[in-house]
Image (tube, helix red, strand yellow):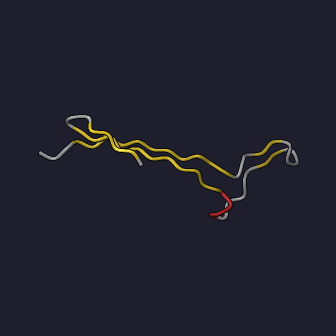
Amino acid sequence: MHTEDLGAAWRISADTTVRQSNYGVKPYSLLMGSIRVADEVSVAFTAVRAKDD
């Protein structure tokens, strides 16, 4: 998690990697497994919030 002071607001961001299989999701595959999605997926977000006066 990272926070940044923008003066009149705060920027908050975070990123992580999760395994789909940890949540009971089977990674997608097609053509008998020749095309597939990795089990690990990167998740990231950024939010900006105005400071209270």
Residue 35 in percent (x, y) is at 81, 42
- Residue ID at (27%, 38%): 5
> Residue at left 53%, top 50%?
16
Residue 5 placement, left or right of 32: left
Rendered residue at 62%/63% (across/down): 23
Question: Going by the image, does 42 lie left or right of 34?
Answer: left
**Residue extending furthest toward the left:** 53
Taking the spot 16% from the left edge, 47% from the top edge, the residue there is: 52
The x and y percentages for residue 26 are 72, 58
The furthest residue to the right:
32
Image-based side of 30 in relation to 23, left or right: right
Q: Nearer the viewer, residue 40 or 36?
A: 40
Name the spot of residue 53 as percent of width and height, x first.
11, 45
Report which quarter residue 22 is drawn in: bottom right
- Say whether residue 1 is left or right of residue 11: right
- The furthest residue to the top: 7
Q: Position of residue 47 (x, y in %)?
A: 36, 43
